[in-house]
Image (cartoon, rainbow, N blue to C red):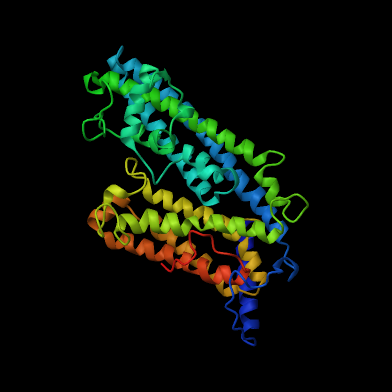
């Protein structure tokens, strides 16, 4: 079933159930404790939905990032080769600049996919307090001064008396956030404050600083691709998390029931509440406290060097919608319709579409909006909140799911 046909089917089901609901009444407000035997009630095949979301949405997204991170790595390497030629052949500056733009665009492509992965954090991305995820993308913990230090450490080949090994470095010194800084920051000055500064950096000539940064960018981009491959290997291994999801309810599965697997996917979708709504919109807007207090704070936006903040939010919503509707396969909207909750289907799908369209209509960056028209950012927050309010109440109640710990007791 293609996407347009599925939308027509959902609309027809909503109309049919709405007409039926006119002759029925319900006062059910139960949430996580409602129907402890959910797997045995109704005829909806939760196992089929979990398999469809795993095989059609989550796994392809992980694989797409692995592919894009490889393309990104090649583009960064090509840029650095062009950059190093400039010191020998100054006329190559235009070629190096073109190669840099290409590398930046490949970063954007990879980030667009990663922002969809962010909505699908489970299994290997959550293990060891999210270590693998943080190696690829450490936001909201970002430390550009640490990146500046590692540029010099990598150039010297040693750190603390040991050979430099990026795999042993902390997440804030590498990953997509570090690569953004290396590719998009136009200033060659280090970002450190105080007396501790990257050794020898200020004494380098401009071309030496550019080369040092691009060489470290090559190492960082290669490390991102290596970690993306680790993610795919862990996810698709015989005993990997993908199979655990699809085998939920079977002997030896970590999930006692298919409903528990459904809940694991639902938990991941709450990224839209805690990270997208609160971290990416409410915090820089000053709706929540930020480093500027309770006022718009452009410095706190995600992906500030690339001005990619709004695209990040858009692709969070894209991934959320895929999981919600199943795209061209089974998704949570099918489950909700089977439970007779056409109202939540209509409200959530409509709210997601509205939020995406309003963000995509913006012609300014998040930083510019916060300076010139913060009301637009507040409107984005209201749009996404419309989705997450339904997620935290009606969605959870209708499907008898448990709120993740990060959202329990959160009424925002």
Residue 30 percent location from the top left of the image:
59, 75
Residue at 32% across / 18% down in the picture? Answer: 92
Residue 241's image quarter?
top right
Where the C terminus falls, by quadrant?
A: bottom left
Residue at 64% across / 53% down in the picture? Answer: 53
Question: Which residue appears farthest toward the right when viewing the image?
Answer: 251
Where the N terminus falls, by quadrant?
A: bottom right
Residue 56 percent location from the top left of the image:
65, 49
Question: Which residue appears farthest toward the top when viewing the image?
Answer: 88
Residue at 43% across / 23% down in the picture? Answer: 78
Question: Which residue appears farthest toward the front when viewing the image?
Answer: 161
Asked whether, in this view, residue 50 is left or right of residue 122, the answer is right
Q: Foreground residue, 102 or 394?
A: 394
Residue 100 percent location from the top left of the image:
37, 29
Residue 67's image quarter?
top right
- From this viewpoint, is residue 347 visible? no
Asked whether, in this view, residue 185 is left or right of residue 56, the answer is left
Residue at 68% across / 61% down in the picture? Answer: 259
Q: Foreground residue, 321 or 152?
A: 152
Asked whether, in this view, residue 18 is left or right of residue 137, the answer is right
Count the marks.
Answer: 0
Q: Foreground residue, 409 or 48?
A: 409
- From this viewpoint, is residue 37 visible? yes
Q: Taking 19 as reference, is 193 above or below it? A: above
Q: Taking 101 as reference, is 335 above or below it? A: below
Residue 184 percent location from the top left of the image:
33, 35
């Amino acid at each position: 079933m293609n996407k347009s046909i599925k939308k027509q089917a959902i609309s027809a089901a909503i109309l049919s159930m709405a007409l039926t609901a006119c002759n029925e009444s319900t006062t059910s407000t139960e949430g996580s404790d409602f129907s402890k035997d959910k797997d045995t009630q109704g005829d909806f095949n939760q196992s089929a939905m979990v398999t469809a979301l795993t095989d059609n949405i989550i796994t392809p997204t992980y694989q797409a990032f692995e592919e894009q991170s490889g393309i990104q790595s090649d583009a960064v390497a090509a840029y650095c080769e062009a950059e190093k030629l400039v010191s020998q052949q100054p006329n190559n500056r235009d070629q190096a600049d073109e190669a840099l733009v290409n590398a930046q665009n490949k970063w954007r492509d990879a980030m667009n996919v990663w922002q969809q992965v962010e909505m699908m954090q489970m299994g290997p991305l959550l293990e060891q307090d999210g270590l693998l995820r943080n190696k690829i993308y450490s936001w909201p913990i970002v430390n550009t001064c640490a990146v500046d230090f590692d540029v010099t450490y990598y150039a010297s080949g040693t750190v603390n008396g040991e050979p430099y090994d990026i795999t042993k470095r902390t997440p804030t010194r590498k990953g997509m956030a570090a690569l953004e800084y290396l590719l998009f920051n136009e200033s060659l000055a280090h970002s450190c404050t105080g007396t501790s500064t990257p050794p020898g950096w200020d004494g380098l000539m401009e071309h030496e600083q550019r080369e040092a940064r691009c060489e470290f960018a090559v190492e960082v981009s290669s490390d991102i691709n290596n970690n993306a491959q680790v993610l795919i290997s862990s996810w698709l291994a015989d005993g990997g998390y993908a199979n655990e999801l699809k085998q939920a309810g079977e002997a030896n599965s970590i999930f006692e029931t298919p409903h528990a697997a459904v809940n694991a996917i639902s938990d991941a979708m709450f990224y839209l509440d805690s990270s997208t709504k609160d971290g990416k919109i409410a915090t820089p807007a000053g709706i929540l406290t930020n480093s500027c207090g309770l006022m718009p704070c452009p410095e706190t936006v995600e992906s500030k060097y690339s001005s990619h903040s709004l695209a990040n939010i858009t692709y969070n919503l894209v991934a959320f919608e895929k999981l919600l509707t199943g795209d061209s396969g089974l998704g949570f909207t099918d489950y909700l319709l089977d439970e007779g909750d056409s109202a939540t289907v209509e409200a959530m799908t409509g709210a997601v579409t509205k939020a995406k369209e309003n963000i995509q209509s913006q012609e300014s960056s998040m930083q510019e909006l916060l300076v010139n028209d913060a009301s637009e950012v507040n409107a984005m927050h209201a749009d996404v909140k419309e989705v997450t309010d339904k997620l935290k109440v009606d969605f959870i109640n209708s499907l008898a799911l448990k709120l993740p710990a990060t959202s329990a007791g959160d009424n925002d």
